[in-house]
Amino acid sequence: MQSIPTGELHIFFGAAPGVGKTWAMVDAARQRLAEGRDVVIGLVDTHDRPEFAALLAGLDVTPRREVEYQGVALHELDLNAVLRRKPEIVLIDEMAHSNVPGTRNPKRYQDVLELLQAGISVYTTLNVQHVASVAKAVEDITGIKVREQVPDFVLEMAASVRLIDLDPQELLKRLSKRLFQQQSGAQPAPGDDAFRADHLVTLRELALRVAASRADEELQKLAPPHHKPEPWGTSSRILVGISASPNNERLLRATRQLVTELHTTWLAVYVETDADRELDPASRERIQKHVQLAKELGAETLTVAGEGVADTLVAMAGQYDISRIVVGRTRRRRSLFGPRLSLADEIMERSETLDVLILS
């Protein structure tokens, strides 16, 4: 269970660099300043646009910390300076950014969490491709591996996620006119595959879906209890198994999407059998990677010992009052004694009450 921050997180969210997230964030901060709130800039990338200078005028700025890395002087967020200053609101651009190696927190979103826990509200920006549950889909669409990811629980704890939308054709015009200049190394440069018109359309659709899903979750919270839908059974919670299979990552991400659509929670379980104790180091490393991914996607995770995967998953479902198990689509394997049952078949043989969802 993630600790609950005392500051408020406000995310300015978009489909791609250049849609106007940073401008909208600073504009909102100026409104708070006009209301008498104590607002400071922790780190804002102006992209060398002269119009930003006027927008930032009058806002208190916390100087950045200079860090030398591989012979290059980099300017990063000075987390300690912001904590000492302790404003009501701090602006921190590009939440998915990776900090310089050796910094207290490897990721900028971890800096954000630390500030929230200190009672400081944070305004920040985020592109859809950096949301952990969406990153693999973006890679499949654009061919670009998304290395900087923000766990979904960070979005879930936000007080607001404001979608900053721009038509893809307008974004391409903006890029072509150099109204947005690429920050070195942070995002794909204009002209890369991510900035093809068809890819921008798809990224925009993903951003709209993420924002709509969050809005729907908020609506469910506001609705009276008897108006909340209960899709199937007495418990809407979902259970999924963790394994060493390379396909398990895709299964976990698909389960996360299903959990979001059904407005529920999920439990990811790794069942260690006697055979698993003989796994090679690469397989064990994949299991640990999948456990960590499940945590980042918002699942509660467990590792349990069991004689068989199906038996143990069915038992865990009963113990945790879960009515649905998600498994991946697998082919029946053959042995000397004929076809072996798939995991889904084994689970259905052992329980008549569990719903088994098979995802490809």
Image: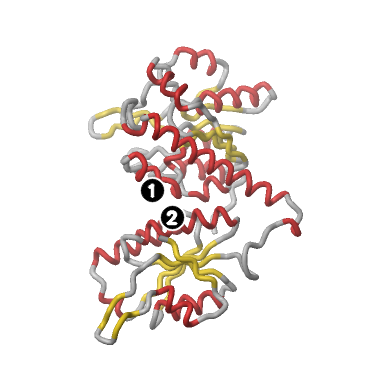
Q: Which residue is mark 1?
A: 136
Residue type highlighted by circle 2: Arg
Residue type highlighted by circle 1: Lys
91 is higher (above) or lower (below) than 239: above
**Farthest residue, direction bottom:** 337
Quadrant in the rendering for residue 293: bottom left
262 is higher (above) or lower (below) than 237: above
Crowd tier of the residue under label 1, counting other residues whose Cα lies within 10 Å: few below 14, some 14–19, many 20 or above:
many
User: Quadrant of the image for the C terminus?
Assistant: bottom left
For image coordinates 30% across by 28% down, the residue present is: 73
Q: Position of residue 103 (x, y in %)?
A: 37, 41
Label 1 secondary element = helix
For image coordinates 57% across by 77% down, the residue present is: 353
Crowd tier of the residue under label 2, counting other residues whose Cα lies within 10 Å: few below 14, some 14–19, many 20 or above:
many
Q: Which mark sits nearer the N-terminus, 2 or 1?
A: 1
Q: Position of residue 127 (x, y in %)?
A: 46, 36
- In terms of depth relative to the viewer, which is nearer, 62 or 359? 359
Q: Are marks 2 and 1 in contact (CB under 8 Å)?
A: yes
Q: Which residue is mark 2?
A: 253
Q: Position of residue 1 (x, y in %)?
A: 54, 59
For image coordinates 44% across by 46% down, the residue present is: 134
- Residue 104: in sight, yes or no? no
Q: Position of residue 181 (x, y in %)?
A: 38, 21
Residue 181's tag is none
For image coordinates 59% across by 73% down, the residue present is: 321
- Residue 215: in sight, yes or no? yes
